[in-house]
Image (cartoon, helix red, strand yellow):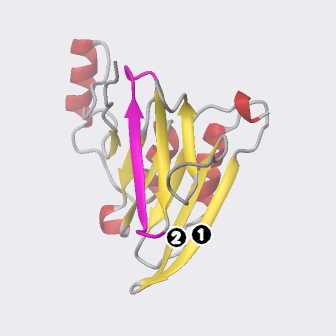
Amino acid sequence: TLSEMSGIAGILRRDGRDVPKNWVDYLEQSLMLDGEIPHRFEDSIPVQSGNLHIHLLGPGTGPGTVPGPILVDGEFAGECAFAIWKPESLELELGRRGTGQKPLYWLDLADAGDGFVFCSNPLPLQRIAKELELTNEHFAKGVQEYLQLGFTPEGGDLLMPVCSLPTEYID
């Protein structure tokens, strides 16, 4: 069932180029548990540079105060990571709430195109970064950080160019 899945993922590409199928596959594979395929939402919207492409993967979408799909890993009112697609403004809102138990990572496509990729698991983002030859020039510093602290802090160098989305604390 969908409740066995953990995590959310997606791609927003604004440069008119197609989203490589293997990127979507990497994200989908990272979310699958017990062979369950995540819910997929895909849209392509004409913009000045060609088409804006949006791909969202996760345990499903739900109704909300916005007309687009909502992905939530956890409980939306509490501990969670979420993505909300707002088609009328072409905006994707990402967030984390709680004490940080639900991770969310993102990769800026930078010189590889206008847009970004996000996922609850950093490994598919690392694969995409490697394909795009986006290297981590701060890896040694990141390893040192990890060895000194015993964890990788938000914004740390170990996973660069993949970044961790900060958590919004809720009482």
Q: Residue at x 53, y 64 (%)?
A: 54
- Residue 54 to residue 157: above or below: below
Looking at the rendered structure, the kind of residue marked 2 is: His
Q: Can you identify the residue that label 1 sits on?
A: 43
- Residue 114 to residue 11: above or below: below
95 is within the stretch colored magenta: yes
- Residue 14 to residue 70: above or below: below
Q: Residue at x 54, y 46 (%)?
A: 9
**Mark 2 falls on what kind of element?**
strand
The Cα–Cα distance between marks 2 and 1, rounded to whole angstroms, is 6 Å
Q: Residue at x 34, y 18 (%)?
A: 171
**Mark 1 falls on what kind of element?**
strand
Q: Residue at x 52, y 70 (%)?
A: 53
Kindly indicate whether the residue at mark 1 contacts the one at mark 2 (C-beta within 8 angstroms). Answer: yes
Where is residue 95 drawn, in percent x and y? Answer: 39, 40
Decide: few, some or many residues near mark 2? Use Cα within 10 Å; few <14, some 14-19, many ≥20. many
Q: Foreground residue, 28 or 47?
A: 47
Q: Which mark is residue 83?
A: none
Looking at the rendered structure, the kind of residue marked 1 is: Asp
Q: Can you identify the residue that label 2 sits on?
A: 53
Of the image marks 2 and 1, the number of the one nearer the N terminus: 1
Where is residue 43 drawn, in percent x and y? Answer: 59, 69
Span shown in magenta: 88-101
Decide: few, some or many residues near mark 1? Use Cα within 10 Å; few <14, some 14-19, many ≥20. few
Image position of 6 (left or right of 85): right
Where is residue 36 drawn, in percent x and y? Answer: 78, 38
Where is residue 163 drawn, in percent x and y? Answer: 32, 41
